[in-house]
Every structure is written in C-alpha cells, then in structure tokens.
Amino acid sequence: MKTQNESIRTKAQETFEKHLEYLSTGNISAWMALWNEGGVLEFPFGLKEYPAQVSGNEAIHEYIRHFPNYLKIEFTKPTYHLTEDPNLVIAEFKGFGKMVTNGRPYNQTYISVVKTTNGKIDSYKDFWNPLVLQTALGENNKYDGATANM
C-alpha cells in the first residue's frame, strides 16, 4: 500500500509524463489542461530573443500554441530525482526531433524542475542548451511564440 507522499509523487510524475506525451504529439489543448491557473513557465538559460518567463495560462498558451508548427520531437523516458516534496518533480531526459520549418535536427538534453499541486503544474523550470535551439532554428527562422504579447 502506497503512503500519501508516494501517491502524490506518482501523480506528479504521471503529470510530467503526460506533458512529454502531449508536446510530442502536438496536443496543445491537453497540454494546457495540465496547468493550474496562473502557472509559470521559466527558461533560465534560454536565448535572449525569447522570454525568460511566461506567466499565466493565457500567455503560456500563446507561447506554446505554435510548438507543433515548428518542432516534431520524441522524448526519452525521464529519470527522476526524488525530493522531500512529493509535489516537486526533477527529471532528466532527452528529446530527439527536427524543425518542421527547415528540417534541421533538434537533439536536446533537458533537466526540468516542475512544481505541481493535485497533479497540475504550478511552475515549470526548463533547463536546456540554447545553442542547440539556435542551431536548429537557423538564420532568420524565429519561433512565433517568442513574439507573443507577454
């Protein structure tokens, strides 16, 4: 029988895995349903042309809705690093894909720090190598989500 903390942790990890599934299939509506109202999406090491933080569901949706038009990606099974807080997910994983707009490869290593409540995302810190994205986007190939009014 699982303890309460184990059940919470399992639910948080299931939410994280749904996040990967929905992004890889381009199901943005389902991906947005994983978020609590007022969520925060952060990119501590992102490119300067793009927002370092996107706050609120409307802004997050505006940012991510273009994702399937730019990138087709598959993610590896994440490795989880357990924390004292069962609502906090720290995961390492890889993404293998290509840019839809130019066919360039996009192969990335991620570390994500995700805070959840009741199986919904409150905050998501996405650590990745911005040079991989810059190379994949190529010259004059910008991601529309970055120009959204945030």
Image: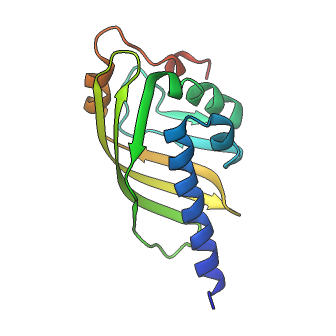
Q: Quadrant of residue 100?
A: top left
Most foreground residue, 87 or 79? 79
Judging depth in this view, the residue of 105 and 123 nearest the camera is 105
Q: Nearer the viewer, residue 11 or 55?
A: 11
Residue 78, percent across and down?
Answer: 40, 59
Residue at 29% of width from left, 16% of height from top? 138
Vertical placement of 140 versus 1: above or below?
above
Estimate the x, y position of residue 33 in percent, counting from the top left: 71, 45
Q: Residue furthest bottom?
A: 1
Name the residue at 58% across, 62% down: 14
Q: Is 92 situated above or below 65?
A: below
Q: Residue sitting at 63 percent across and 25 percent down?
A: 62
Q: Is residue 70 above or below residue 23?
A: above
- In this view, the residue farthest toward the top is 140
The residue at the far right in this view is 37
Query: Position of 20 compared to 79: left or right?
Result: right
User: Where does the image place residue 95, in percent across and percent down from the top left?
Assistant: 35, 44
Number of residue marks: 0
Q: Quadrant of the C terminus?
A: top right
Residue shown at the point (37%, 53%) measured from the top left? 76
Q: Quadrant of the N terminus?
A: bottom right
In-image side of 8 versus 106 (left or right): right
x, y percent for residue 18: 57, 53
In the foreground, 35 or 41 = 35
